[in-house]
Amino acid sequence: MHINLPYIDRIWRARGEVVLDEPLTPEEAFDRLDPLFQTAGSAYAVEGDTLGYSKHNPAAQDKLATFTRGTLRLVRQDGRSRLVFDVSSTALLLCFLAPLLFLGFAQTMVALNAWHNADAEAVEAPEKDKEAEKPKVKRELHPLDKLLGAPEPDDPNKKKDKEKDKDKEKKEKFDPTRAYVLAGLFFLIYLVGRVLEPYLFKRTLRAVLATGQTELEGAGEHAASAPPAPQPEAS
Amino acid sequence: MAGVRVGNRIIGADAPVTVGWDNIGRVEGGPIKQFIFTHFQPAVLFGLIAFWYYAPNEWALASIGIIIGLGFKVFLLGLEWVNPRYRSWQLTWKEFATDVFYVGMGYTLLRMVDTYIGDGVMIGAVQGAFDWDKFAWFTGLPLLVQALLISMIFDFGQYWMHRGMHNWYPLWLAHAPHHYITQLNINKGNVGNPIELFLIGLGIGGFFDFLPRAFLIAGAIGMAVGTYQHINVRFNTPRWWRFIFNTTEHHSVHHSQDYEATRSNYSGTWIIWDRIFGTCIDGEAELLGMEGGRRMDIRETMLFPFTEAYKDFRAWLSKPARTPEPAPHQPEPAE
């Protein structure tokens, strides 16, 4: 995603820097970061003090699974080293757009409801007559259940007026509430991701630059038999 | 890899699978943790059955069942952090967001499609065509018997649909994307192509007439057992439970990277269907997925059945037409 859209691109881009504990040359720093790019679907290239990378559909546990493309630049100043990053995430962008999809589903449901209601009005009367002819049978509980104290089923013919009113109100074929809730949920997930993921990204870089270990080697152990070490990707 | 012989099959020749119950992981920790993670599953199951059995009619509603189901899922998400089965299955933000997308599709798009062509519609059409009434005498049975029947009938259908998906190519095309999941988490049951999720949701329960309360108890059994198919929590599952019910262990074998192992444990709730039909493999696996654990993204998951079918159709078309091989020249026998 190389589109240059100032401000708007903050939706899917993260920029920042990690100050290194010890001064490192670009070669040393990128050498330590190398394991992060030795995963399936990863490609990277180093040019001077800058490393550019991209990952195609990384594994679920890949440390850079969210930010799949970007550049890392090592800046040395006053005897200290800083790693400046500018990375982008398709996942964040799609998550940001997901509410629109679910709002679209909600609108489809509203439209279908209107269409069905228009249809139903035309054929409502005869159906009601049919229903009136057939009184519903009241179900009886098995004697064993009566003995154990399970509540008796309601008599379907003694429907309370309130419920009848409810039935009249609830003519809708589809309830769009779930679609609205999902739209809201995705907006919430996006907000969490936008804050959490850059933080975890920085934490991963800091940890790898300090030790040169990615912790990826831990995969395969039984969680129960080895107490989990702090996980940079925890979300 | 040598693998282990189970019946006339070799399990674990392609990828590691722990076969049998002797070497599977156990919950580590103090006596309280051990107690909780040993008895949690049965306690929830019996608690829910008792709740629905005795709940007053105003409470015995499907909407309350849905709220309990959602609350249960959120609680189990928390348990994944407290006592994970494998670190390599830990839920990340991206995995969570992806899973919720599939859950959302199930609650919206699939529900709309189901309304028009789902099992309810098909059963209604069959009943209308033949003027069959429902099997009304079922409502006279004890509630728990009705609930067990609903649960087992539905799961029997799921077993054969699922087994069909692993054995008949057109159905496999729809089911394959679900087998690209590389870890088990609470919402992973919803990850897959919508066609598959539609097919697996079909049931024949609608032919029978049950008391609504029995349906709620059956739903609770499905929830309190089937949910553990996809979850990253380590339990010390009781022996009796894993004999009759499906477990995370069974389902991890089904999702393993070992081809033979995936052709087992097809049921959703009642593993006894697999035991009866000879497809059960007790054990567990950590390395899951297809093609060595390649993750399938949402776009590919949505398109896979169509793109694969198209590719295969093209390959079939471009195959040279079969002509009978010329018979090898037979030297004539010397006269």
Image (spheres, rainbow, N blue to C red):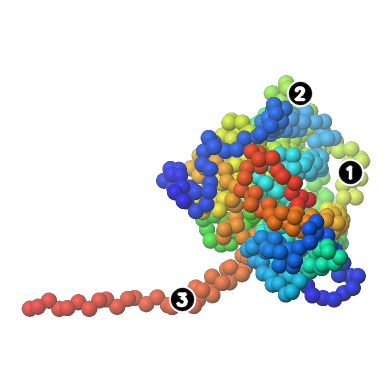
Question: Which residue occupies 76% across, 23% down?
Answer: A149
Foreground residue, A18 or A22? A22
Q: Which mark is residue B185?
A: none
| Residue assigned mark 1 | A164
Do pointers 2 and 3 mark residues of a single chain?
A: no
* Amino acid type, callout 1: Lys
Image coordinates for residue B198, horizontal then vertical, percent: 67, 56
Question: Which residue occupies 53% across, 46% down?
Answer: B17
Question: Which residue occupies 90% across, 50% down?
Answer: A169
- Which sits earlier in the primary sequence, circle 2 or circle 1? 2
| Residue assigned mark 3 | B319
Label 3, secondary structure: give it: loop
Q: How far apart are labels 1 and 3 at the CA level?
A: 65 Å
Question: Which residue occupies 67% across, 49% down?
Answer: B89
Q: Which-is-in-front pick, marks 1 and 3? A: 3
* Amino acid type, callout 2: Gly
Label 2, secondary structure: give it: loop
What subunit carries mark 2?
A
* Amino acid type, callout 3: Lys
Say few, some or many: other residues with alpha carbon within 10 Å of mark 1 (under 14 / 14 to 19 / 20 or more): few
**In the displayed structure image, the side of residue A68 where residue B15 appears, left or right:** left
Foreground residue, A10 or A126? A10
Q: Which-is-in-front pick, marks 2 and 1? A: 2
Q: What residue occupies the far left of the structure in this picture?
A: B335
| Residue assigned mark 2 | A149
Using the rendered image of the protein, determine whether residue A119 is visible from the camera's viewpoint.
Answer: no
